[in-house]
Amino acid sequence: MVVDIAEQSSPSVVTVSITAERQTSQSFFNDPFGLFDFNTPRNKEQIKQDIGTGFVIEGGLVVTNKHVVASTDGKYRVITKDDKEFQVSKIYRDPTNDIAILKVDGMSVPAIKLGDSGNLKVGQFVIAIGTALGEFRHTVTTGVISGLGRGIQAGDPFGGNAEQLDNVIQTDAAINPGNSGGPLLNSAGEVIGINVAVAQGSQNIGFALPINSVKEVVSSFQKTGSFERPFLGVRYQMITKETALLNDVPAGAYIVEVVSGSPAETAGIKQGDIIVKADGQKLTDADGGLAAAINNKKVGDSLELELFRDGKTLSQSVSLTSQ
């Protein structure tokens, strides 16, 4: 089964590579302790590095992680399974999710099948394909879904800054730096997640974005040519029931920061508030937290929030905008 899925899906998986320049110093003096500044000339050398993975969807677009293509200083290209190279002509980076779409001219690669991440179960069999360690292209690993509804910070040694992601899939299929942006497949060979991060200092713990949230982004992009997602404008941390009991506060989304000029600020949401409910539903990690509530909306929709502030419960309606 694994052999069949790998053979079926691998042609749709590509390696993402960057070409960039870096400065090197040329030293003419023996100064092992760096005590002197001789203003030695600096040379530039061009480096090429495989930095991540992507996969081709309908329309010939390549989906990967935003942090894989975070740098704006280099030129990107994708490399197919048969080692053909194609320049990336345009990059569209989602401002609110760790997703990027690459436009590649002249590439003819079959689109991969997208599955449904709405009914995943812990213990379900999965397969990951990617460029492990930025060196070993089309590495295939297997495992199971070991957790759902996790909250993590995404990023790897080849990518940009980490960012908070909620409602991700946890898997024990081996995922290494360089796998970012690659597909996590089910037993039918359908993509159910985008591999996004590795848990540092651990073994066999990796994470993937659920494909359903990605499909919504891609669908909007294909219709409008841009990323238009509902935007609330807060940075938050989920408070579990256990933590809530210890601190005598309700469980929910604790507001760490409110973005200036955002719908949240306009509605009067403040740092330190705890959003307990959204549209009457309690916010929990298991259900995807506040991110899931926002992602279920469209730009222009209202989100009815129940807030906990200074021992009091408040109700607030927020009109979501695009970022």
Image: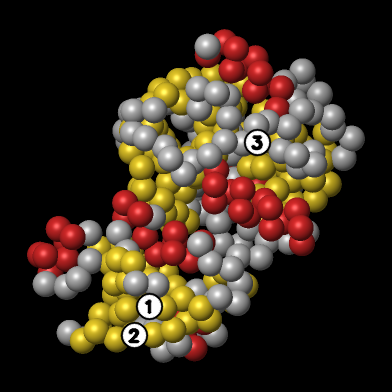
Which callout, 2 or 1, points at the residue further toward the start of the chain? 1
- Write down the residue under mark 3: 54
Q: Nearer the viewer, residue 73 or 148?
A: 148
- Give the residue drawn at x 10%, y 65%: 246
Horizontal and vertical percent position of residue 171:
39, 32
Label 2 or label 3, whichever lies nearer to me, is: 2
- Per the model, the C-alpha gap separating discs 2 and 1 is 6 Å
Question: Please, what secondary structure does the residue beneath circle 2 have?
Answer: strand
Question: Please, what secondary structure does the residue beneath circle 1 have?
Answer: strand
Residue kind at label 3, given as amino acid type: Gly
- Give the residue drawn at x 76%, y 28%: 110
Task: Name the image colouring.
Answer: secondary structure
- Give the residue drawn at x 65%, y 36%: 54
Vertical order, 262 against 96 (above or below): below
Q: Nearer the viewer, residue 34 or 13?
A: 13
Tag of residue 305:
1
- Give the residue drawn at x 17%, y 66%: 244
Residue kind at label 2, given as amino acid type: Ser
Question: Please, what secondary structure does the residue beneath circle 3 have?
Answer: strand
Which callout, 2 or 3, points at the residue further toward the start of the chain? 3
